[in-house]
Image: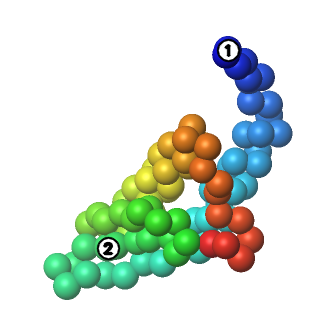
């Protein structure tokens, strides 16, 4: 069976961007004993990052989140919403 999908609309991109921004607002960061930063997003299993600088850690965390979302969507997984995070 061949399934075709419509290309994402501008509204789809806006919703995904908003979702990512909201998820990043939930991020928690800490400084490890070795002086590096560690960040994770509660409710998003396996989404974490570490880096020497806080800004770099944030960027890596957002990249990890984006990859996690793409993989999850491709695999048909439900995304965390509202209180599920």
Say how the picture is coloured: rainbow
Q: Nearer the viewer, residue 45 or 64?
A: 45
Viewport quadrant of the N terminus: top right
In this rendering, position of residue 63 left or right of residue 76: left
The answer to whether any part of residue 66 appears in the image is no
Residue at the spot x=50%, y=55% of the render?
65
Q: Please, which residue is most extreme toward the right here?
A: 11
Residue at the spot x=80%, y=34% of the render?
10
State whether residue 3 is above or below residue 42. Answer: above
Q: Please, which residue is most extreme toward the left here?
A: 34
* Real-space Cα separation, disc 1 to disc 2, in angstroms: 46 Å
Marker count (numbered): 2
Numbered circle sitting on residue 37: 2
Q: Nearer the viewer, residue 29 or 46?
A: 46
State whether residue 64 is above or below residue 82. Answer: above
Q: How crowded is mark 1: few (under 14 residues within 10 Å), some or many (20 or more)?
A: few
Q: Which of 3 and 40 is in front in this view?
A: 3
Secondary element under disc 2, as helix, strand or loop, is strand
Residue 78, how many percent across, how many down? 65, 54
């Amino acid at each position: 069976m061949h399934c075709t999908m419509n290309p994402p609309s501008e509204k789809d991109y806006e919703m995904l961007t908003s979702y990512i921004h909201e998820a990043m607002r939930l991020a928690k960061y800490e400084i490890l004993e070795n002086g590096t930063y560690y960040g994770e997003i509660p409710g998003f299993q396996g989404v974490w990052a570490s880096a020497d600088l806080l800004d770099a850690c944030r960027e890596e965390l957002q990249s990890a989140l984006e990859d996690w979302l793409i993989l999850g969507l491709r695999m048909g997984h439900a995304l965390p919403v509202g209180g599920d995070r």
